[in-house]
Image (tube, rainbow, N blue to C red):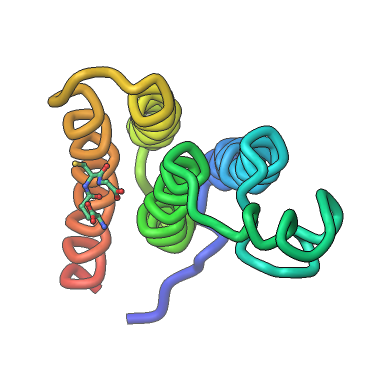
Amino acid sequence: MKMDLREFIDLEVVVVYIKYIIILMIKMMLMSVVTAYYRMKNKAFSNPEDAASYGKGEQAKKYLRTDPDVERVRRIHLNDLENIIPFAIVGFLYSLSGVPYSTAVLHYRLFLGSRIFHTIAYLVPLPQPCRGLAWLIGYLVTFSMIYKLILVSLAM
Ligand SMILES: N[C@@H](CCC(=O)N[C@@H](CS)C(=O)NCC(=O)O)C(=O)O
């Protein structure tokens, strides 16, 4: 069966997807800035040339170390990569799947909220299961969109 995609795709949903993904990308990219901030504040570097800006010889070697704050922010960044990239791909296909606007916005909003809360819970840090629940909500949102995509592709 031939489909006219222009009838199927709701451009408003694609536009709202773009808005949310831009916010999520900025949020994820900001983790690099936060990492750099903690590296400089706590003088903890992984490259000799970076440490050299803060001292020479033995002094510089002292700054070649891992730091708990830096590692924590790096884990947040990694967790963002593990979750936001699948969301970006799945969320885009989902925006083309003929889903109602309100349902799409609910998914995108829940995901964004879950990732912001995950970062706060990880940075503060808040006691578990705060971070775990934040992560789970985002994970389930992505799975819910995958489920819809499976249903749509089975119906084709
Ligand atoms: N790569 C993750 C997979 C599971 C996951 O993402 N768990 C969430 C909720 S507990 C988390 O925040 N993990 C901590 C992290 O990724 O550093 C891990 O190693 O924990």
Is 128 rendered above or below residue 12?
above
Quarter of the figure with residue 135: top left
x%, y% of residue 31?
59, 42
Q: Is residue 105 visible?
A: no
Q: Who's the residue at 67% across and 43% down the image? A: 43
Quarter of the figure with residue 134: top left
Q: Who's the residue at 15% across and 25% down the image? A: 128
Q: Left of 149 or right of it: where is 25?
A: right
> Residue extending furthest bottom?
1
Viewer-proximal residue among 76 and 110: 76
Is 154 rendered above or below residue 120?
below
x%, y% of residue 27?
59, 37
Q: Pick the quarter of the image with the C terminus.
A: bottom left
Q: Who's the residue at 45% across and 57% down the image? A: 81
Quarter of the figure with residue 121: top left
> Residue extending furthest front?
58
x%, y% of residue 41?
68, 33
Tally the marks. 0
Q: Pick the quarter of the image with the N terminus.
A: bottom left
Q: Is residue 120 visible?
A: yes
Is 116 rendered above or below residue 40?
above
x%, y% of residue 5?
51, 65
Q: Left of 84 or right of it: where is 39?
A: right
Viewer-proximal residue among 39 and 1: 39
Q: Who's the residue at 54% across and 43% down the image? A: 17
Viewer-proximal residue among 127 and 151: 127
Is 104 rendered above or below residue 92?
above
